[in-house]
């Protein structure tokens, strides 16, 4: 079959030649793929609106020898709230980069697709910071890196008030076991409970979780360290998001 239909979120788009773009898509049907959008930069292109970064579209793709191409496209949702300011677009870039980094080509995961759509839907509505952290831990769990949060991953005890999150051990470590030579991040009991709630709660209810600044910083630090440990590198757009959170203007 030469042509096939996909529901796709555009993770990124890169210009090639004068009017063409190479798209990285995350699709419901086949997972992550790349496709060529020929002539999409031309003002008269009918496909232009359907292949914008961070858009949800229904695309008809044609199989090619090296890369498939977009034959037709229909935009389903452009998520206007996340496009209203730089902060929303920066976080959308971060979310898209995370999905690209933690998925492999043509390995569909409906949970990842639905999480991506739901997160884009709530960005720009006033709870972006906590939504991004919820996305982090939910994505990590969906792709096989769910951290151990219920008890010490070393001895199985509930632990006391003093706990560490140790990426190399895959989760929480109690004071008796200690973080070990590899080190870890100390995390309060309150931050741990908030992190567990972010994992359990539906993404659409995340706005109801309103951590204090200290808890927010602890959770952000824990997830940043955990992501970098699993990837063995940092997420490029994460630094830009951090600068925005600190109040830098551009």
Image: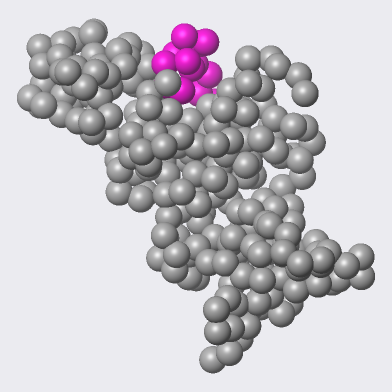
Mark yes or no: residue 199 visible: no
Viewer-closest of 239 and 125: 239
Q: Which quarter of the image is occupied by the C terminus?
A: top right
Q: What is the magenta range?
A: 206-220
18 shown above or below 203 = below
Q: Position of residue 193 (x, y in %)?
A: 34, 21
What residue do we see at 58% from left, 76% from top?
Answer: 67
Viewer-closest of 62 and 116: 62
112 shown above or below 149 = below
What residue do we see at 38% from left, 27% from top?
Answer: 225
Mark yes or no: residue 239 visible: yes
51 shown above or below 64 = above
Going by the picture, which residue comes out furthest to the right?
A: 44
What residue do we see at 30% from left, 48% from top?
Answer: 144
- 214 inside magenta stretch: yes
Going by the picture, which residue comes out furthest to the bottom?
A: 1
Left or right: 154 in relation to 74: left
Left or right: 28 in relation to 85: left
Q: Which quarter of the image is occupied by the N terminus?
A: bottom right
- 9 inside magenta stretch: no
233 shown above or below 58 = above
Q: Position of residue 115 (x, y in %)?
A: 50, 48
| Residue 18 occupies quadrant | bottom right
Left or right: 168 in relation to 82: left
Q: Main secondary structure of the magenta part?
A: helix
Going by the picture, which residue comes out furthest to the front?
A: 17
What residue do we see at 67% from left, 51% from top?
Answer: 54
| Residue 175 occupies quadrant | top left
């Amino acid at each position: 079959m030469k042509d096939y239909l996909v529901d796709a979120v555009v993770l990124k788009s890169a210009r090639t030649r004068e009017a063409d773009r190479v798209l990285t898509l995350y699709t419901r049907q086949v997972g992550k793929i790349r496709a060529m959008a020929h002539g999409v930069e031309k003002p008269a292109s009918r496909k232009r609106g359907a292949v914008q970064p961070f858009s949800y579209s229904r695309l008809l793709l044609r199989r090619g020898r090296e890369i498939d191409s977009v034959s037709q496209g229909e935009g389903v949702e452009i998520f206007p709230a996340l496009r209203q300011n730089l902060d929303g677009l920066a976080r959308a870039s971060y979310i898209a980069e995370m999905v690209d980094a933690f998925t492999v080509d043509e390995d569909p995961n409906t949970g990842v697709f639905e999480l991506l759509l739901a997160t884009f839907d709530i960005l720009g509505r006033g709870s972006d910071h906590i939504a991004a952290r919820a996305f982090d831990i939910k994505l990590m769990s969906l792709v096989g890196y769910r951290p151990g949060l219920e008890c010490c991953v070393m001895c199985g005890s509930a632990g006391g008030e003093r706990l560490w999150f140790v990426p190399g051990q895959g989760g929480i470590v109690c004071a008796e076991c200690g973080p070990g030579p590899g080190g870890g991040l100390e995390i309060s009991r309150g931050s741990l409970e908030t992190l567990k709630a972010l994992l359990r709660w539906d993404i659409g209810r995340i706005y109801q979780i309103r951590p204090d600044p200290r808890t927010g910083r602890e959770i952000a630090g824990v997830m940043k360290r955990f992501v970098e440990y699993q990837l063995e590198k940092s997420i490029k757009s994460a630094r830009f998001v951090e600068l925005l959170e600190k109040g830098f203007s551009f």
